Amino acid sequence: MPTNTNNYLSDLIHSLTKSEKRYFKLYIKDNVPLSKLYDAIKSNREISDLTLITKVFPKQKAGGIAVIKNRLYNHVLRSLNQYHTEKSIDKQIKAKLQNIEILFHKGLYSQCNKLIKTSKKIALSHGLHYSYLELSKWEKQLAVQYNYENISNKDIVNIYDKDMEMIGMIQSFHKIWNIKSELLLKLYKKGKARNAQDMDDFHAIMKKMPSKELLTLDIKTEYLYNHTLSAYYFCILDGKKSYKIIKENHQLVRQNKKAFEDEPNIMLSILSNAIYLSQKYGTEKETGQYLTELEQHYAGHYDGEELELRVFTNRSISQLANIIMKSDYNSGLDLIPEIKAKLNLFESRINTTKLTGIYYSIAGIYLGLEDYSSALSWINKILNEVKIDRAEDQYCYAEMLHVIIHMELSNEDYVHHALKSLKRYLSTRNRMDEFESSFIVLISKLIKTNDKSIRKKYYSDFAEKTKQLKKNPFTQGAFEYYDFEAWAKKNAEK
C-alpha cells in the first residue's frame, strides 16, 4: 500500500527514467562522493545507512551520511530541473522570463521587448495563461520605461483585453477543477450513486457548473469541462453518456497534440477510462484500439521504471476487469504470477483505488476457481491494509466476499465474526441498500440451519432476488464486483 516513508532519496533515484539517469551521471561526473552514493542506492533500493557507512563510506559517521544523502537529493532535483527545461515548454517560458528580467535590469530594452513578444506567442499557443500574464507585466514595465513612446492607445486596450481573456480562462479552469474535484472525491470515497440522496448530492455539485457559453474556454479548459461532465454521468450511473463524452475528449486531445505535449497524463487518463467503459458500452475492437494506443502512448512519453509501473498498473486493471466480466478465470490464473512479481516492485507506488481494484480482482479469480484459501489471503490484504475512508465501496464488497469465503470454507465461527463485522461497517457508514440488506438476511438464515433442502431454497430465493436487483440502477453496481447470482445458483444446485 502507498505509505509515507523517510526513504525519499531512494524513491527519487528509482523513479528516474533511463535518459534522466544518463543526464544525471554527466551532471555529477566530477563529484566522487555523490557518484558513489548514487551508484550504491541505484544498485540496492533498500540499502541501509549502516551498510553505506561500512562498505561505501567507511570514514563517515552517521551524521555525515545524512548530509551527503541530502546533498545528493538536491542534486538530483536540480539535474531534473535542467533536463526538463530542455523538454518542457512551460519551463522554457519560465527560463525566458528570467532572461527578460536580466535584460530589463541591464537596460537592454530592445532585446527584452523582442523576447517578450516571441515568448507571448509560445505561451498563448500552449495555453500557459499564468506565464502570459507574467510576460504582459514585463511588457507594461517596458512601456513605462519608454515613457509610452513606443505604444499606442490601441495597444494599451489590446493588452488589457488579452489580459482579461487570460484571467477569464484561469477563473473558468479553477471553477471547473473545483467542481470536478468535488465529484471525484465523493466517487473515490463513496462510489457511484447508490440511492436517491446520492443522486441529489451529485446533481447539487454539478448545478454549480455554469453553462459552456458563459465560460471562457481554451482547449485545455474545454478538455477539463468534458472530463468533469463525463465523470458526472459516470457518478449518476449513465455510463453510455460518460463513454460518449470520453470519446469526444479523446478526439479533442488527439487533434490538439501541441497544446497537451507537456501533459502526457491527460491522454493517459482518457485512454484508461475509455478502456474501462468500452468493455461495457463499446466493442472489443474499440477496447483493443485503446489498449494499443495506451501502450504506444507510454512508450512515447515514459521509459525505465516509470514506464514499467504505468504499463503494469493500467494493463493489469484492464485485463483483470475483462477476465472477471467474462468469467474467464483460468486465463486470470495465468496472469497472477506476473502481477505478484510486479506488485513486489511497485506496490508502494500505486494509489489506493487502483491497488485495491487489483487485489479484489485477483480474489475474484480465485473465488471463481473455488480456491477459497487463496481468495481469502487477497481479501485480507484489503481488509487489513486499506484505509476504509479511501475506498468505501471496494471495502464494503470485500467484507461481503469475506463472509462468502468463510461460508465456502465451512468456517462457522469465522462466518459469525465476518457477518458481525459487515453489519457494523454498514451501520456506522449508513450505507445499507436493498442488495446488502438481502445479502445479510440470506447469511443470517443460512447460519441458523444445517438442513440442506432449506439452505438450497434460501440460495435459490436469493438468486431470484439478484435478478431483480441487477435491473435496479442503484444496486446493479454490486455485480461489477462479483457475480453474486452465479454464486447463489451454484449453491442452490449442489
Image (cartoon, rainbow, N blue to C red):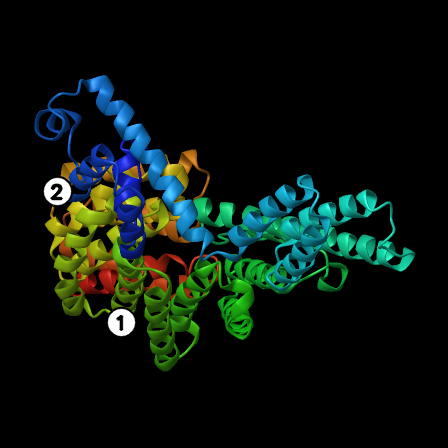
Q: Label 2, secondary structure: give it.
A: loop
User: Quadrant location of residue 299?
Assistant: bottom left
Disc 2 versus disc 1: nearer the observer: 1
Residue found at the far left of this picture: 55
Q: Residue at x 35, y 46 (%)?
A: 351
- Vertical comparison of 107 with 246: above or below: above
Residue 327 in the figure: left or right of residue 217 = left
Q: Label 1, secondary structure: give it.
A: helix
- The amino acid at mark 2 is Asn
Residue on which the image places disc 2 = 411
- Tell me residue 172's x, y (percent): 69, 53
Point out the image quarter for the N terminus. top left
CA gap between label 2 and label 1 equals 29 Å
- Tell me residue 335's x, y (percent): 16, 63
Point out the image quarter for the C terminus. bottom left
Residue on which the image places disc 1 = 326
Residue found at the far bottom of this picture: 285
